[in-house]
């Protein structure tokens, strides 16, 4: 079905253009945060900008343009789960932006509490877990959809 192909392509695009780019950025941030690099100046503004670009891309995904047969339960489920995954992705990016903003302010000499830092880290961790669960849920239906396409 052509309808199913369009939702399959939307899921593939979401992974390719948001999830994979997020993972690359996350690896870059982790690499710049190692002990050996802790005395190097970090460009937090650039990091924040990259996270904002990912958020903007995710916000511009228009699932309403994907015309699916509303009687095809599996396609409808995948579209709904993709919509949920996009929302969860935006939440994780927001958490990362908050965390990077905290680190930027700290690097500029602003006084911040350790509690605020721990909250920022916790929010990233929580958002990561929620996104992983959402993606697992979507992937199960997506695999069925692809198999029966």
Image (tube, grey):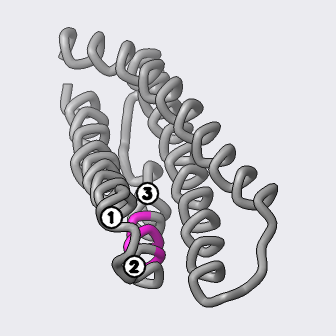
Image vertical order of residue 38 relative to residue 58, above or below = below
Residue 145: x percent and y percent?
A: 28, 17
Query: Mark 1 highlights which residue?
Result: 32
Disc assigned to residue 83? none
State which quarter of the image contains the N terminus: top left
Image vertical order of residue 3 relative to residue 115, above or below = above
Residue 87: x percent and y percent?
A: 57, 47
Q: Residue drawn 75% across and 51% down?
A: 119
* Magenta-span inclusion, residue 148: no
Q: Which of 64 and 115 is in front in this view?
A: 115
Mark 1 Cα shell of 10 Å, populated few (<14), some (14-19), many (≥20): some
Do labels 2 and 1 touch, CB within 8 Å? yes
Q: How far apart are marks 2 and 3 (CA)?
A: 34 Å
Residue 70 seen from this side = no
Left/right placement of residue 88 relative to residue 119 reads left
Do labels 3 and 1 touch, CB within 8 Å? no
Residue 61: x percent and y percent?
A: 41, 58
- Quick one: which residue is furthest to the bottom in this view? 108
Q: Residue drawn 25% across and 33% down?
A: 8
Disc assigned to residue 42? 2
Query: Mark 3 highlights which residue?
Result: 62
Left/right placement of residue 126 relative to residue 89 reads right
Q: Distance between the residues labelled 3 and 1?
A: 34 Å
* Magenta-span inclusion, residue 52: yes
Magenta stretch prevailing secondary structure: helix
> Dot 1 lies on which element?
helix
Residue 149 seen from this side = yes
Magenta region: which residues?
Answer: 48-54
Q: Which of 3 and 47 is in front in this view?
A: 47
Identify the mark nearer the N-term, 3 or 1.
1
Foreground label between 3 and 1: 1
């Amino acid at each position: 079905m052509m309808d199913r192909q369009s939702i399959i392509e939307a899921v593939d695009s979401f992974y390719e253009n948001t999830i994979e780019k997020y993972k690359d950025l996350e690896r870059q941030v982790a690499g710049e945060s190692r002990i050996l690099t802790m005395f190097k100046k970090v460009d937090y503004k650039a990091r924040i900008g990259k996270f904002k670009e990912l958020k903007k891309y995710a916000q511009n995904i228009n699932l309403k343009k994907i015309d699916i047969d509303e009687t095809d339960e599996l396609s409808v489920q995948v579209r709904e789960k993709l919509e949920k995954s996009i929302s969860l992705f935006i939440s994780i990016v927001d958490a990362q932006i908050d965390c990077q903003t905290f680190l930027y302010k700290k690097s500029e000499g602003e006084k911040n509490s350790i509690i605020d830092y721990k909250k920022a880290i916790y929010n990233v961790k929580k958002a990561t877990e929620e996104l992983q669960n959402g993606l697992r849920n979507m992937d199960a239906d997506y695999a069925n959809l692809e198999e029966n396409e």
